[in-house]
Structure formats: structure tokens, C-alpha cells
Amino acid sequence: MLKFIFHSARRNVITAPSIQKLPKVAPADLRESYVDAIVSEIKTNPCSLIPVPSIYFGGGIFFEVKNLSEKISVYIHIPFCAAKCNYCAFNSKVAPADLRESYVDAIITEIKTNPCSLLPVPSIYFGGGTPTVLTLNQLGKIFNAVRNKFHVYENAEITIEANPGTVDKNFLRELRTIGFNRISLGVQSFNDALLKILGRIHNSKTAISTVTNTRNIFDNVSIDLMYSLPNQTLDDVKFDVQRAADLNVNHISIYGLEVEEGTKFFQLHEEGRLNLPDENICGDMYDYITEILPRLGYERYEVSNFAKDGKKSRHNIGYWTGRKYFGFGAGAHSYSGELRTSNIADVESYVKKIRAGSDVSQLEEVVTKQAAMEEFCFLGLRMTEGIDAQIFLKKFGENIFDVYKNVIEKNLRLGLIDISGDKIFLTARGMKVGNVVFSDFLLS
């Protein structure tokens, strides 16, 4: 038996770094001619009716960029942390220095071998894990690899996540020198007892000093806060929110705890040893947060995000508005508008495959028109400005009020959405039960 392998030479398609054959950006007419040629080659092959147990279409099939002037966001995943928190289900781990160094080399190789160069990049985001467990030299090398590969806008938003306890004044100053201009600090709470329950490495004093130092060095500082935590009260939430406002951060992201499988919290919950606040108290916490932050000068621009002084997260807005993006690193995702891909999540396997020149990327989803319409709606509805019917029409060639007639009428009747001109958006009540509304916009 024979195995057939078909190779595509379309290199306006972004592939995994291992695929370096026939590097060519080709116009549509050449691609069509290539298809005709390969069909002829197959037809004229003198061997007919041989049993074929497998067929493999190889080459550039993963990530197509049709417009080389189109903006692309860049995400860098650093899957390392100083300690694994009790609630964390992210792709992260505590790792020795030699593995971190090997990983840095691998991610730089992945960036350098990406076949699309000089695409315009308005935002870069270093997430994790805790990116600041890497050395300044390592972070600088990764950042320079991105800057050398793509056309990073002079005014690009360049964010790095950090945790209190992993950065001091000198480290923060050097981050500015490297080129970072926004920091997102994983504070979670200013309550020592709650921080201990969460398994955080910092205490409230460290959190306050880190936020203060960062605010003195960066003019764009975001912090994460959590609610619905074990043993947490409404007064605890009030204290955390006020403390964040007193520290004059520019941006606050608020997240309700989700107990996810594979975490220590999940195990404790299964054993009945996780004392979570009841649903009514969690609702009171949510109501307080969403009512008080605007009074304190923070505009709510997305379900979980509040900003003052116009410091909205431009990178995340790119996700919510459908901008294409590259993700580099173990477990990172990429999106082309038509395809979604993901890198293998295991750090050691990622490093090994990069070293061997093997493929680390896998096709996750072919985004159909229906899926794209659904995503446009539920991501757009996350933002307070909502969905723009004219953009929907331009993007999909269909009237949103026809496609979603029954859904829109139902949620209007329930008071979960409202309409103003061409905009469809969640009401305050709709924001509170956003997932219910989002599910209504699934067409399947």
C-alpha cells in the first residue's frame, strides 16, 4: 500500500515554524494554476487503483492572511509562575531555570520562523503564568524578536502581566526601558487572609507597595480583583475596591471565582471543604462592584472591565472586536478570521518540537460563516457599546435584525438587551446574566 502526501505551496498562509519548504507569497491566479497543475500530475500518474489507506494534505494550511496591511495583535505566553495558586487552571507551572531558558530560546525561534514579516502590530501582550518570573534579559530578547519580526506601531500598547512579589522598582524601570508601557498586576485582594486561601505568594503590604511603585513608573496600570472567594464577605469586597481606587490605578478587571477541575479548590469543593459565599451574597458583591466603580470614576466598558482616563485595554478590545492575532508559546492560540489554531500545551514537548523543527501548531477550528456571526454577537455584547448592525451587514452581507429576529425580540421583551440606532447592547440586567443572553445568539 502507498501513502500519498500533497504539499501546498501557498505561503500567504501562516504555518507552524517547521514548514519552511517552498517559501512563497502567491497571488490568487498562481494558486489556481498550482491547483490545476497538481490535479494534472495526479491524473497522469501511471499507477491507478492502488489501495490507499491514507491521504495527507501538507504545507501551508493553518493561518491565512489575505491582507498584509491588516493589523495583527501578538500574544506571548509565558507558562511559568513562582507557585501554583489554589484556584488556577491556566497552562502554567513552576519550572527550573534551565527549562525557562530553553523555553525562551524556543519561543524566539517560533517568532523568527513565522513566515509573515512586517505585519502591522498595534498591541502585544505578555501573559501567563507570571511573565515576570523570567529575567529582564529573557523578556528583552523575546520582545526584541517580536519587534524585529513585525512592524510594531510606535504607539503600540505593550502589556506585561506581573504579580506582586515578583517585581521591585529596578525591575519595573527596566521593563519600561525594554519597551513595555502597560502592566497588569494580579493583586486579587488586599486581604491577607483571602490571599492565603488563594495560595498567593504576596500579602497586602506587598500588593500595596507594588501597585504604588508601578503607578509611579508606569502611567497605564491595571489590577485584577476577585470576588465570590471562600470566606469572603461583602465588606471584604468593599474594602478591596476602595483600596484599588485609593491607589489610583487606571484599570480594574473584576472576576468572580470559578472552581475549575484540576485545581486545589476543585478538590476541596469535592470534599465539601470549600466555604463559598451563597448565590445571594455573590449577587450582592457583583451589584456593589458594578455600581460603585463608575461612581469612583471607572467607566465600565466590558462585562468585567473598568477604566479611567481612557485607559481601556486596547489588546483585549482587539479580541472582542474580532481582530486577528498570533499566539506564540506553549498552549498559545492564533486566529486568522477563518481558522483557529493552538500550540501544544506541554512545555517540554513544545521545546523539544521547536528544537527538532517539528510542527507545534494544530488546527482547532475552521470558522464557518455561522460561527463567525455567533462570535461577532456574543463577543460584541460583552462590551457596553454592544453590536453595530451596520458592521454586521458589511461583514456578513446579512441584516442582523433578520438573522436574529426572534432572539432580539425575546431579549428585548425580557429587558436583557436594548437598541439605540444601529447598536444592540446589554442592559444592566443583561450584563448580570450575560451568558444566558450570549447562548441565545448561538444559531445551531
Image (cartoon, rainbow, N blue to C red):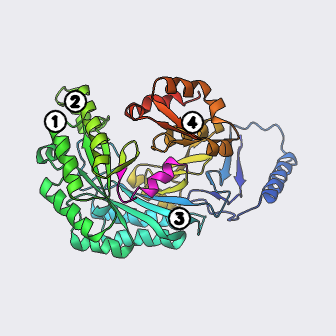
Q: Nearer the viewer, mark 4 or mark 2?
A: 2
Residue under circle 2?
A: 281
Q: Residue at x 26, y 26 (%)?
A: 279
Q: Which of the two residues, 400 or 15, is positioned nearer the viewer here?
A: 400
**Quadrant into which the N terminus falls:** top right
From this viewpoint, which residue is outermost toward the bottom? 177
* Secondary structure of the residue carrying numbered label 2: helix
**Magenta stretch bounds:** 306-322
Dot 1 alpha-carbon crowd within 10 angstroms: few under 14, some 14 to 19, many 20 or more: some
Q: Amino acid at mark 4?
A: Glu
- Mark 1 and mark 3 lie on one chain; the one further toward the N terminus is 3
Residue under circle 4?
A: 374
Q: Amino acid at mark 2?
A: Ile
Dot 3 alpha-carbon crowd within 10 angstroms: few under 14, some 14 to 19, many 20 or more: many
Q: Which mark is residue 121?
A: 3
Are dots 4 and 1 in contact, CB under 8 Å?
no
Observer able to see residue 367: yes
Marks 4 and 2, how far apart at CA? 32 Å
Residue under circle 1?
A: 233
- Mark 1 and mark 2 lie on one chain; the one further toward the N terminus is 1
Observer able to see residue 110: no
* Secondary structure of the residue carrying numbered label 1: loop
- Residue 249 image-quadrant placement: bottom left
Marks 1 and 2, how far apart at CA? 8 Å
